[in-house]
Amino acid sequence: MNMTDCQMCRRWEDEKDLQVIELPYSYVTLNRDQFFPGYTLLFTKDHVTELFHLDRNVRSALMEEVSTVAEALYTIYSPAKINYELLGNMVPHIHWHIVPRFVSEPLWPRPIWAETHEERFLSPEEYFQHTETLRRALS
Amino acid sequence: MNMTDCQMCRRWEDEKDLQVIELPYSYVTLNRDQFFPGYTLLFTKDHVTELFHLDRNVRSALMEEVSTVAEALYTIYSPAKINYELLGNMVPHIHWHIVPRFVSEPLWPRPIWAETHEERFLSPEEYFQHTETLRRALS
């Protein structure tokens, strides 16, 4: 796969309305489907597939970025738990699903993939509000 | 929750036949259900819930352990992808699901939670073979 075939390589530019922040090693965007409120993606700037393909220093710095975003989501949304998932079976470019989880959810305490559901799209104002709140917490 | 109520705090001792290796910050065990061949758990020695509750140095060291186990699984099983998941909605003690994924699987490329399935248990000899192979790769 070259970069032009990888949707994650283009995602930062393709989904400007979901942009949260550019960090040293990753981009952070809100997930368009907000069925799980605060569902955030963090993906590497470079096209890399596995954690163990990164240099140790880069891996550590990337995981600091994941942890910092998770903590910010925890502070903003007050969930019961944060879920962190790096899958990439369909899009093999490191992207973390960082998802606040709430006891009040229909799927709780199961994984977010346990049941299909209608996607929940927000208004442009609502996307801005979520991304801006997270951006401020991370700035 | 105190430690005696947490199944993950007891798991290393409770599932001796699944033990792979003790690392500086974590224990590594094979998952009893081997529907996904090589499905491995890595859990912190301390009862901690979120990545951002750890000190940076411990977090980095823990992620090195996750990455090293993932690379060993990749070498042993030759999967298409490794999946890394830290959920903890039911058992809020950091435990990583590190799962080799194969194109030949019925669930591929969906997440392992996308469909329920019969659990696959191995014979004692087979558990030993899997844990010993991984232990050797990590030693």
Image (cartoon, coloured by chain):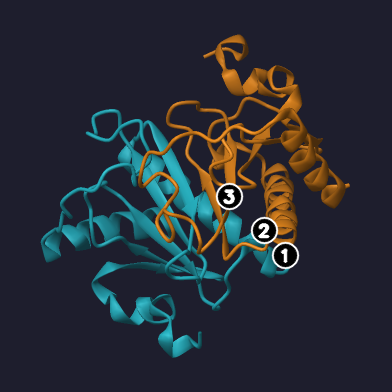
Chain colours: A orange, B cyan
Which residue does the image show at 74% across and 63% down from the upper left? Answer: B56
Is the Cβ of the residue at disc 1 closer than 8 Å to that at disc 2? yes
Image coords of residue A37 (percent x, y): 61, 47
Determine which residue is flagged by label 1: B57
A74 with respect to A91 (left or right): right
Same subunit, tags 1 and 3: no
Instruction: Give amino acid for label 1.
Output: Asn
Instruction: Give amino acid for label 2.
Output: Ser
Image coords of residue A122 (percent x, y): 65, 34
Report if residue B121 is visible in the image: yes
Which chain contains the residue that carries disc 1?
B
Label 1 and label 2: CA atoms lie apart by 5 Å
| Helix, strand or loop at mark 1 | helix
CA neighbours of label 2 inside 10 A, class few (<14), some (14 to 19), many (20+):
many
Which chain contains the residue that carries disc 2?
B
Which residue does the image show at 30% across and 60% down from the upper left? Answer: B31
Image coords of residue A27 (percent x, y): 73, 34
Instruction: Quarter of the image for the C terminus of chain B: give it.
Output: bottom left
Is the Cβ of the residue at disc 1 closer than 8 Å to that at disc 3? no
Same subunit, tags 1 and 2: yes
Instruction: Give amino acid for label 3.
Output: Val
